[in-house]
Image (cartoon, rainbow, N blue to C red):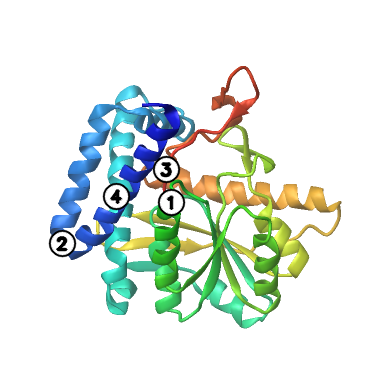
């Protein structure tokens, strides 16, 4: 089987598995879905595949004093957290507004409400912590606030279409990451006083801003800071985490201010670093809920065919 045919077969299988998840898991009783997710997570963790090893490598940066036993515990908990995300997401379209509202508790939500009430628009930026889809559904149903977001174009295209339909069904406007028109649309939504939500701890463009992140250089997207500068919108970081209950927790953090002096690039760099610092604090408090199963730091990237380092590929939590 040549590589293009093999890739198409893999993409078809991936799409079929996700389709099965959305069509089947959402009908399971919640305790059954929880146990199923834990079994899948534990099986994947025991196999020690690339994603688990990458997660463990990333966690080693977050918890640098952890010994191998502690890292193994964290990565197992991380896989369980990751599968909790998927089980919740597969079931989310079938949840009632009441179930969504009781499934999440956000501290300092007044910062978001006051920001929206100001009419300036708000950019809400989050890392890959816990379940941002649940948080988004809570915003659209509990707060009654629609918002616009951006999604990575997954392969196969049918899988990307599934994610778009799923998120639009939760009340979100979803724009593709590629294509060049997303930034302008986001800016228009913000100038109209709207809400934009962006997962912003991993750069997908290879042109992100360099930040210091857990003691080493990483790249994060410039979009949140640039949007805030160009539109006058507030830039609010948010972090999420799980505890030992069925309720997901979260916090909205104080706004990141636009520096009074400096070039646009300097202001963007300073704001993105401030965002990275908030993300790092939230991740350090709840490392097992950081679903980063891909390479993030440039030092971890592998050269491809003798050329420059390239980011890892594959389907991920968008």
Location of mark 3 (residue): 315
Query: Residue 252 or 223: which is nearer the viewer?
Result: 223
Residue 108 visible here:
yes
Seen at 75% across and 51% down, the residue is: 268
Q: If you read the primary sequence from the N terminus, does the residue marked by circle 2 or circle 1 appear first?
A: 2
Location of mark 2 (residue): 28
How busy is the neighbourhood of tag 1: few (under 14 within 10 Å), some, or many (20 plus)?
Answer: many
Q: If you read the primary sequence from the N terminus, does the residue marked by circle 2 or circle 4 appear first?
A: 4
Mark nearest the camera among 2 and 1 is 2
Q: If you read the primary sequence from the N terminus, does the residue marked by circle 1 or circle 3 appear first?
A: 1
Q: If you read the primary sequence from the N terminus, does the residue marked by circle 3 or circle 2 appear first?
A: 2
Is residue 245 found left or right of 106 in the rendered image? Answer: left
**Up-down: is 71 above or below 128?**
above
For marks 2 and 1, give the CA distance: 25 Å
On residue 16, the disc is: 4
For marks 4 and 3, give the CA distance: 13 Å
Mark nearest the camera among 4 and 3 is 4
Location of mark 1 (residue): 129
């Amino acid at each position: 089987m040549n590589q293009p045919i093999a890739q198409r077969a893999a993409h078809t299988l991936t799409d079929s598995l996700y389709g099965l998840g959305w069509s089947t898991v959402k009908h399971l009783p919640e305790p059954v879905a929880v146990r199923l997710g834990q079994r899948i997570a534990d099986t994947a963790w025991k196999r020690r595949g690339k994603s688990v090893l990458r997660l463990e490598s990333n966690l080693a940066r977050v918890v640098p004093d952890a010994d191998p036993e502690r890292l193994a515990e964290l990565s197992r908990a991380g896989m369980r957290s990751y599968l909790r995300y998927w089980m919740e997401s597969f079931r989310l379209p079938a949840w009632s507004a009441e179930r969504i509202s009781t499934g999440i508790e956000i501290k300092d939500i007044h910062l978001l409400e006051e920001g929206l009430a100001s009419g300036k628009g708000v950019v809400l930026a989050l890392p890959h912590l816990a379940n941002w889809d649940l948080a988004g559904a809570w915003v659209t149903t509990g707060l009654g606030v629609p918002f616009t977001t951006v999604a990575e174009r997954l392969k196969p295209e049918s899988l990307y279409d599934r994610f778009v339909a799923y998120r639009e069904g939760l009340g979100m406007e979803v724009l593709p990451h590629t294509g060049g028109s997303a930034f302008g649309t986001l800016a228009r939504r913000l100038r109209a006083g709207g809400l934009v939500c962006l997962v912003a701890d991993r750069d997908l463009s290879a042109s992100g801003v360099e930040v210091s992140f857990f003691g080493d250089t990483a790249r994060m997207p410039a979009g949140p800071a640039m949007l805030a500068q160009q539109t006058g919108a507030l830039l609010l970081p948010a972090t999420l985490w799980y505890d030992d209950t069925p309720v997901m927790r979260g916090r909205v953090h104080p706004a990141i201010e636009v520096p009074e002096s400096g070039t646009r690039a300097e202001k963007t760099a300073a704001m993105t670093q401030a965002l990275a610092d908030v993300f790092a604090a939230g991740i350090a408090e709840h490392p097992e809920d950081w679903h980063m199963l891909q390479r993030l730091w440039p030092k971890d990237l592998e050269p491809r065919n003798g050329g420059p380092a390239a980011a890892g590929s594959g389907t991920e939590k968008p």
